[in-house]
């Protein structure tokens, strides 16, 4: 399958805020019982990382990021494209198919990365989310509404001087969301 970038690798920088698509990120949606020790153990053995059980949190290593979506649902974002099929096959072989669901959702959503020192001010224009309190550290994520669009927002930064977030959005809303962000940058004239 030939994957296509929604924004065709267009990077927008306006008033010291960078907006770009992170294209071609492999994504798996995993459903399973968080109270099932066999599920947790097998998941951990395949990924060599402990699955997050606290709401709206993430864990990550150099290869992927695992995001808690609900008490029985997680999203895996792959930073290393070369291991996607290998991990998918291992999960399919190791997890009980009667009790779990593994779905490749790589083409379902795209990721918009937004960086800059005024990013929080920009995002507040479009969300009611109290971003500073909800995303207190870089293990936090939030599922919210951005100008009537459902999104998943992930904090990337450790440095409080320059903020960075990844926004997961349905592919059909990507251009609209990007255009809103670019227009919103107009208030930050240097």
Image: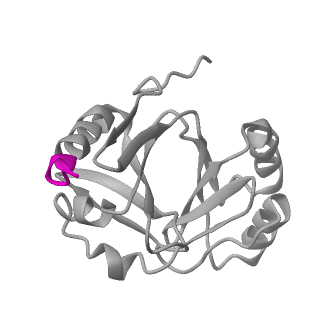
Q: Is residue 79 left or right of residue 16?
A: right
98 above or below 69? above
Q: Position of residue 98 (x, y in %)?
A: 68, 55
- The answer to which of 3 and 135 lies nearer the viewer is 135
Whether 142 is drawn above or below 16: the answer is: below
Residue drawn 47% across the image and 27% down it: 9
Question: From the image, which quarter does the N terminus lie in?
Answer: top right
- Give the x, y percent position of residue 111: 45, 44
71 to the left or right of 170: right
Residue drawn 23% across the image and 37% down it: 179
Location of residue 76 in the rendering, given as x and y in whole percent from the top left corner? 62, 54
Residue 36 picture quarter: bottom right
Colouring used for the render: one colour
Query: In the rendered image of this protein, does residue 63 appear above or below residue 32?
Result: above
- At horizontal 62% and vertical 62% (from top left) the residue drawn is 66
Q: Which stretch did the figure color magenta?
A: 184-190
Say which quarter of the image contains residue 49: bottom right
Residue at 45% across, 60% down? 164
Tag count in the figure? 0
Q: Position of residue 139 (x, y in %)?
A: 55, 74
Say which of 76 and 146 sits in front: 146
**Is 183 in front, or is 174?**
183
Please identify the quarter of the rendering in which residue 80 is found.
Answer: top right
Residue in front for this viewpoint, 72 or 162: 162
* Furthest-top residue in this view: 2
| Magenta-colored stretch includes residue 93 | no
């Amino acid at each position: 399958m030939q994957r296509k970038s929604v924004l065709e690798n267009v990077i927008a920088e306006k008033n010291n805020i960078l907006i770009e698509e992170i294209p071609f990120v492999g994504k798996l949606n995993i459903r399973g019982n968080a109270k099932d020790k066999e599920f947790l153990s097998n998941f951990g053995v395949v990924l060599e990382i402990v699955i997050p059980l606290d709401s709206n949190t993430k864990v990550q290593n150099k290869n992927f990021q695992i995001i808690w979506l609900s008490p029985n649902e997680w999203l895996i974002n792959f930073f290393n494209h070369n291991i996607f099929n290998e991990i998918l096959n291992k999960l399919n072989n190791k997890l009980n198919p009667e009790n779990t669901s593994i779905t490749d959702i790589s083409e379902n959503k795209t990721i918009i990365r937004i960086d800059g020192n005024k990013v929080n001010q920009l995002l507040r224009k479009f969300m009611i989310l109290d971003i500073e309190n909800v995303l207190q550290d870089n293990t936090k994520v939030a599922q919210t509404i951005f100008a009537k669009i459902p999104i998943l927002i992930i904090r990337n930064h450790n440095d409080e001087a320059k903020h960075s977030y990844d926004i997961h959005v349905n592919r059909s809303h990507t251009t609209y969301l990007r255009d809103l962000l670019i227009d919103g940058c107009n208030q930050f004239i240097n």
